[in-house]
Amino acid sequence: MFSFEEAIRSVNFAYNKTSLPINIQNLFQDEKLINLTSNSQPFWIMVKALKDFVDNEGCGRLPVRGTLPDMTADTFKYISLQQLYHEQAAKDTEAVYNRVQLLLQNLNLPDDTITEQDIKVLCKHASELSVIRGSRIADEYEHKGNADNEISQSLEDPDSLIEHYIILRGIERFYSEYYTYPGEIDEQVEPDIPKLKSCISKLLNEWGCMSSTKEDCIHEYCRYGKSELHSVSSFIGGCVSHEIIKLITRQYKPVNNSFVFNAINCSTESFKL
């Protein structure tokens, strides 16, 4: 028998309106999907087929994953329900695969360009699909992206780690002006504090930001004096290794753009600058 207590705890999910995740909505509006050609990557052909499925057979929903989460039920009912999920997932996969074949024909591409196994993987992970388009560091420094808006919005959050990014950028400017790092010389720690504040203020003015960074944080960076902690370096090295593995194996989502690690409270945050 099913657990009524478990059903009561989950009833709010049942009454939620079915809607597509924002990452899927963005994919369905992408120009590469709208303007398919024979040179389009197989990924966009599959996403186009997925969109056609959602608009037609799916009636606004993504394909069923085919897996059933753990729940309180007797063996017979659980297996029966699981079988229903498997059957519906197979039907959805077949519908998407048929639409892929139709698209391949219209684009004059070979039928084996996209395999049925590719479609099974696509349908199983449909809700997790997303496209990450990186940017150049030069664009970030030349204000060609959305860095200014991202920084301004993040500064409004008192718990955001964006202030560390701003101070590090200020330290870069400090070095370009004085050819040394703030606090690198013990006798210059206190005199370097107002100099670093000035560099940071110039940056914030260039970005059109009205807020400022915390003074105690600036003091700590000057007292830090370009030191390097082995534990922090080790952690950052591990993060970089993970990202390289993601890119090589093409598995999992890489960090998009800037990544900040606060070793004091072991918190992290990424920014699209």
Image (cartoon, helix red, strand yellow):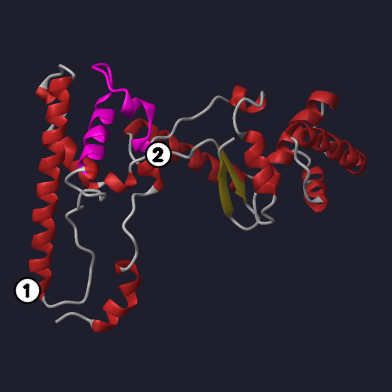
Point out residue 10 in the picture as x, y percentages from the top left corner: 32, 73
Q: Tell me the quadrant of the picture where the C terminus can be found.
A: top right
Give the residue drawn at x 35%, y 71%.
12
What is the quadrant of residue 88 in the picture? bottom left
The segment highlighted magenta reads 26-53
Name the side, left or right, on which 8 lies relative to 152.
left
Give the residue drawn at x 20%, y 41%.
53
From the image, state whether disc 2 or disc 1 is nearer to you. 2
Q: Nearer the viewer, residue 4 or 219?
A: 4
Task: Give yes or no for residue 49 being in the magenta stretch.
Answer: yes
Q: Nearer the viewer, residue 168 or 50?
A: 50
Label 2: how many Cα within 10 Å (few below 14, some 14–19, many 20+): few
Question: Which mark, by number, is residue 76?
Answer: 1
Give the residue drawn at x 88%, y 38%.
192
Point out residue 48 in the picture as x, y percentages from the top left corner: 25, 33
Q: Secondary structure at mark 1?
A: helix
Q: What is the count of numbered marks?
A: 2
Classify 204 as above or below 83: above
Name the side, left or right, on which 45 lies relative to 26.
left
What main secondary structure does the magenta stretch of the protein show?
helix
Name the side, left or right, on which 14 lies relative to 211.
left
Disc 2 and disc 1 in contact, CB within 8 angstroms: no
Q: Nearer the viewer, residue 15 or 89?
A: 15
Give the residue drawn at x 45%, y 30%.
133
- Given the image, on which type of amino acid does mark 2 rest? Asn
First-in-chain label (2 vs 1): 2
What is the quadrant of residue 201 in the picture? top right
Question: Which mark, by number, is residue 49?
Answer: none
Q: Secondary structure at mark 2?
A: helix
Residue at the disc numbered 2? 26
